[in-house]
Image (cartoon, rainbow, N blue to C red):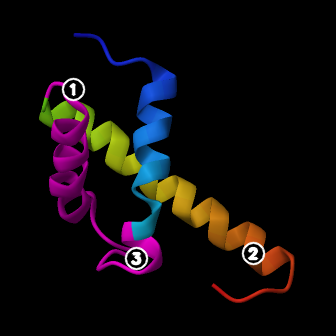
Amino acid sequence: MFVKDYQIAEIANAMQPYFEVGSLHSRSSIKQIVPLALEELADRGYPQRRSLAVVISKMAQATWVETMLHTRQRGGQV
């Protein structure tokens, strides 16, 4: 099964609560994020490939960092 880019982005976006109120933060290692990405893949019935989980983890972390930067630019708190 091939997972499309938009599906990867959806999963990365769905992982944002792990950063907001969970145990992850902007400096979490990819190794710490991968198990959660694998869990998200399993929940959606996608293949649980580690390489795919790494891509999703990196995208989720980058999305969180981008959110923080946008919030700071607007003068808010993260």
The secondary structure type at the circle numbered 3 is loop
Which of the two discs, 1 and 3, sits closer to the camera?
1
In which quadrant will I find the C terminus? bottom right
Q: Does 11 sit above or below residue 65?
A: above
Q: Where on the picture, by quarter, is residue 43? A: top left
Q: Residue 35: where, in percent of width, then height?
A: 15, 55
Contact flag, marks 2 and 3 (Cβ < 8 Å)? no
Q: Residue furthest bottom?
A: 77
Name the residue that disc number 3 marks.
Answer: 25
Labels 2 and 1: the sequence-earlier one: 1
Q: Where on the picture, by quarter, is residue 26? A: bottom left
In which quadrant will I find the N terminus? top left
The secondary structure type at the circle numbered 1 is loop
Separation of disc 2 and disc 1 at Cα? Answer: 32 Å
Separation of disc 2 and disc 3 at Cα? Answer: 15 Å
Q: Residue at x 78, y 86 (%)?
A: 76
Q: Residue furthest top?
A: 1
Q: Tell me, for residue 46, which label it has, or none.
A: 1
Q: Residue 58: where, in percent of width, then height?
A: 39, 48
Q: Does 60 sit above or below residue 9?
A: below
| Residue type beneath disc 2 | Thr
